[in-house]
Image (cartoon, rainbow, N blue to C red):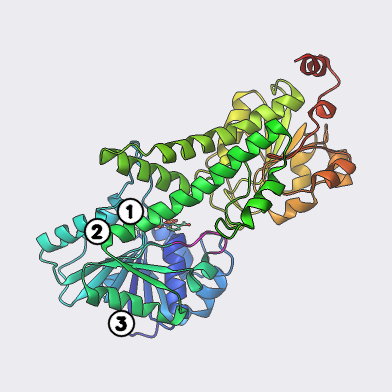
């Protein structure tokens, strides 16, 4: 850094903290990012990005002059505006674990000058009010508090930060709201000014609505399977309606990731702690759990009992272009398959699941993963899998069955390449797919 006092401090060097720090540096600010993990900070100081996010490494490199990484509290609290980007994972009760947020708040020293604490972490409604009271009680009334929830998506986080659909700024005072809004002026995005509680709710409600759309189209897909319709055609027909729009209408094996699962449950808990039973959200979450498990039924439909069968899980990250494995459907699938007695071979171009999955074989290439497999399951829609239905893959597999959990392939193309193909909510030919055994007869009778 140039030696100037940082204009912006950031607590947390995870996805949100690093993207926030790097993007504000790109906008010309001196930024200091603090994390409590020394190995993370050392890696960043040495120019290594501890996570996979397209475009972020370049941004960090380009703005190295204006960006510092530290474990020291003193350095970050010298900034007049401090963004809180620490994790808020779920507790056993489903409520958000705010311990990292409280560590930040409680460890703020008695700052001489006026400063603003800006909450980017996703927190329950009411957190701002509670933090405000805690700051006041500690004689830190001159430290402002602003809720500025983050809406970036992993995989496109830099673009999302730099070209947001909107920014939400919830503050207790006009001056604090204005100071935070001013930082975003160069982005030329609509700014929604709100009270703090509403800003907190906007984030939770937006995520819940996105989850609802996905669970909705997944249920439509399941009904399509039962009735012979094709969900891809249905989604297109729905999405062109301007009142509905095309986004988050991709049928698949369900959502995962670091946000939807925990934020969905946190909102459900928040409602229930306030005496309200959020029936729709409960259903949305349950549909998603069942959707992941439907893959097992589909495999059994084709292969019979899975004991002793070899299944290739292609893609482990919860979505493409990230190495984030938090709540990834792949983890549920792998565990269920192992419990059924299947052998599981996996491949992912960037996600390393060796710390979270035991008993599976990790492969370096798609071809290695599918070799000898009775089925290949597309779990994450990585670009590399678009050419899965190839001659090379077909001959490597013990049985050429593709279960396309993301509707990534063209069913006709896959079938004409000699594969049995089954997607999600797409017309399938189940009888043609059954093994030439008594299981087939059994299914024919059923
Ligand atoms: N990842 C996303 O796509 C995304 C999108 C929008 C909002 N959010 C929200 O943003 C918050 C952060 O998410 P994330 O994915 O970046 O989390 P993350 O787990 O990747 O990173 C959090 C970082 O904070 C650090 N930390 C913990 N306590 C600290 C402290 N006292 N001081 C400094 N650093 C500390 C951790 O060591 C970790 O590196 C969460 O509330 C999340 O819900 C995440």
Q: Which residue is mark 2?
A: 128
Which of the two discs, 1 and 3, sits closer to the camera? 1
Residue at x 79% of width, y 29% of height: 430
- Is residue 153 in the magenta section? yes
Q: Which residue is mark 3?
A: 5
Label located before the other in sequence (1 or 2): 1
In front here: 321 or 73? Answer: 321
Q: Mark 2–mark 3 contact, CB under 8 Å?
A: no
- Is residue 47 in the magenta section? no
Crowdedness near tag 1: few (<14), some (14–19) or many (≥20) residues, C-alpha within 10 Å: many
Which of the two discs, 2 and 3, sits closer to the camera? 2
Query: Is ligand 1 within 8 Å of the beta carbon of the residue shown at mark 2?
Result: no
- Residue interval drawn in magenta: 151-156
Q: Which image quarter: residue 81? A: bottom left
In front here: 423 or 35? Answer: 423
Q: Is label 3 in a helix, a strand or a loop?
A: loop
Quarter that holds the C terminus = top right
Q: Is label 1 in a helix, a strand or a loop?
A: loop
In the displayed structure, 199 sits above or below 277; it is below
Label located before the other in sequence (1 or 3): 3
Query: Is ligand 1 within 8 Å of the beta carbon of the residue shown at mark 1?
Result: yes
Task: Find the distance from the CA under tag 2 to the CA under tag 3.
Answer: 27 Å
In the displayed structure, 157 sits above or below 359; it is below
Crowdedness near tag 3: few (<14), some (14–19) or many (≥20) residues, C-alpha within 10 Å: some
């Amino acid at each position: 850094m140039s030696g100037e006092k940082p204009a912006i401090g950031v607590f947390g060097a995870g996805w949100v903290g690093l993207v926030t720090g790097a993007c504000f540096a790109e906008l010309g600010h001196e930024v200091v990012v603090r994390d409590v993990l020394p190995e993370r900070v050392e890696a960043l100081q040495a120019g290594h990005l501890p996570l996979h996010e397209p475009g972020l490494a370049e941004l960090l490199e380009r703005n190295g002059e204006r960006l510092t990484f530290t474990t020291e509290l003193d350095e970050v609290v010298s900034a007049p505006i401090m963004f809180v980007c620490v994790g808020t994972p779920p507790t056993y009760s489903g409520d958000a674990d705010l311990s990292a947020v409280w560590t930040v708040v409680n460890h703020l020293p008695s700052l001489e000058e006026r400063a603003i604490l800006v909450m980017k972490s996703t927190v329950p409604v009411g957190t701002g009010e509670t933090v405000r009271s805690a700051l006041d009680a500690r004689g830190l009334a001159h430290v402002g508090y602003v809720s500025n929830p983050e809406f970036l998506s992993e995989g496109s986080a830099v673009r999302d930060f730099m070209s947001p659909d909107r920014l939400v700024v919830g503050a207790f005072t006009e001056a604090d709201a204005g100071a935070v809004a001013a930082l975003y002026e160069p982005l030329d995005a609509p700014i929604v000014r709100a009270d703090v509680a509403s800003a907190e709710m906007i984030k939770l409600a937006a995520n819940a609505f996105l989850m609802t759309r996905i669970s909705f189209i997944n249920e439509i897909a399941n009904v399509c399977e039962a009735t012979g319709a094709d969900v891809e055609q249905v989604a297109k027909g729905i999405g062109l309606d301007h009142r509905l729009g095309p986004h988050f209408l991709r049928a698949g094996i369900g959502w995962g990731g670091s946000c939807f699962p925990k934020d969905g449950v946190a909102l459900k808990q928040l409602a229930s702690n306030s005496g309200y039973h959020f029936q729709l959200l409960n259903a949305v979450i349950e549909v998603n759990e069942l959707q992941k498990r439907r893959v097992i039924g589909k495999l059994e439909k084709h292969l019979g009992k899975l004991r002793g069968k070899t299944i290739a899980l292609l893609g482990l990250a919860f979505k493409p272009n990230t190495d984030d494995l938090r709540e990834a459907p792949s983890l549920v699938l792998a565990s269920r398959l192992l419990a059924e007695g299947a052998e599981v071979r996996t491949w992912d171009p960037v996600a390393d699941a060796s710390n979270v999955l035991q008993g599976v074989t990790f492969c370096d290439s798609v071809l290695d993963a599918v070799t000898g497999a009775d089925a290949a399951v597309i779990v994450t829609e990585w670009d590399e899998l678009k050419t899965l239905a190839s001659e090379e893959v077909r001959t490597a597999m013990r049985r050429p069955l593709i279960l396309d959990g993301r509707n990534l392939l063209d069913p006709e193309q896959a079938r004409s390449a000699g594969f049995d193909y089954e997607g999600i909510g797409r017309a399938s030919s189940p009888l043609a797919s059954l093994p030439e055994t008594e299981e087939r007869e059994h299914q024919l009778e059923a």
